[in-house]
Amino acid sequence: MEHVTARVKALMDDLMARGVLTAEPWRQALYEVPRHLFVPSTGWACPDIEGGTSRTIDRNADPNGWWDAVYSDASIVLQADDGATDPATGKGMISSSISAPGVVVAFLELLNVGDHDRVLEIGTGSGWTAALLSWRVGEGNVTSIEVDEEVAAGAARNLKVAGYTPELIIGDGGEGWADGAPYDRVHVTCAVNRVPYAWVEQTRPGGVIVLPWSPGSPRGYRVRFEVLADGTAVGRVGGPALYMMLRSQRQEARWNPHHADAAERTTTQLDPRTIADAGPGADLAVIAQVPRLGSYAMPDDDGGLSLLLFEVDEADGSWAACDYTPGADEFEVSQYGDRRLWNEVEQAFLRWISWGRPGRERFGITLTRESQGIWLDSPDSGNTWT
């Protein structure tokens, strides 16, 4: 269909102009594996561009709007609340989606597959990336795991229509798929806080794992690991990537100011906006030094802001809040629990400044069977945190 080819070209031109799409094989793949074969007739489109407006798409009621969304840099929600909520309403927790083409291509280029590589994909979703990988390395070399039976069934139908038959497994992606190991590449389409060691164990030495890493802050990152002969994996932190969590790692991560009357109240001269707005380098430095930290910034309508801190693995754990008020000389800090999270974050942030404000690209992660550690500059630099 000529209009599909024209839409693919327009999307490809946009991705190339933004420097997202650079590798020739994936340019051809966008033509050979039409995205519309993997998008349902109704859904919720979320543009992956600043200022984009999410909206319902309906192929029957508004075919032009549906086609525009399919061939734009937008993710499209396939499932909400594990199937309990209609995804086209835009309500509920997103539990499956077809990711925006820009971030899909970014991860595929980071994966850097070669001819005949054996690839394990964690999270089949719509099946689109499994089809792209099948086109690139051959469907017999692709194994894709999906935890949700309904989503997996939809992916199987989509792949059949598109003409690809990779091996599809229903199960917990966190366990990988040992029957097909060793893999040359592991491609992960859901976020993790802690990387399952099974993925490392099932990757051959010199192999590559790419994944979205979501360490507890509002930011998420692309990470590319390479596996060593001793079963260690070493990776560098890359660009942004916000994905839904691996289901086995879902946890209630929220600020819960319990026992507020008993909280310790002090003041600080450090403006909490300085931390909230410092960027990925500061974010990674704080996460490395303050274990199990969750955080988010909450602005108000009067120009104020509260930086909210909590322990991600403790529903009733320690918490803290630092409140910015316009014009104030000092800012109120409230803290409760066994830890003084504001003090820990403040010290970690100021230490990051003392290092010369290193950026995201200077941080990395080392994985072993026993531990997951963050480091600055190199694994043996001395600046390492487990």
Image: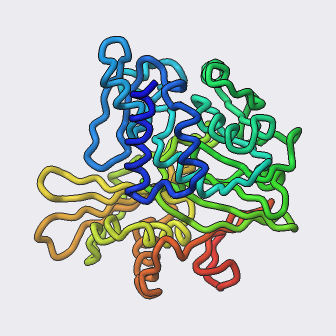
7 relative to 291 in the view: left or right: left
Residue 34 % position (x, y): 53, 31
Residue drawn at x 47%, y 32% is 94
Using the image as rendered, state which of residue 219 and residue 106 is in the foreground: 106
Residue 258 appears in the rendering: no
The type of colouring in the image is rainbow
- Residue 326 % position (x, y): 13, 66
Instruction: Work out whether residue 37 or residue 382 is closer to the camera in this orientation and state it.
Output: 37
Q: Quadrant of residue 308?
A: bottom left
Q: Quadrant of the C terminus?
A: bottom right
Is residue 60 in view from this perspective? Answer: yes
Q: Is residue 350 above or below residue 183?
A: below
Q: Taking 302 as reference, is 378 left or right?
A: right
Left/right placement of residue 352 relative to residue 321 reads right
- At a point 66% along the width and 36% down the height, the residue shown is 130
Q: Position of residue 318 (x, y in %)?
A: 48, 56
Q: Between residue 38 and residue 25, name the one nearer to us.
A: 25
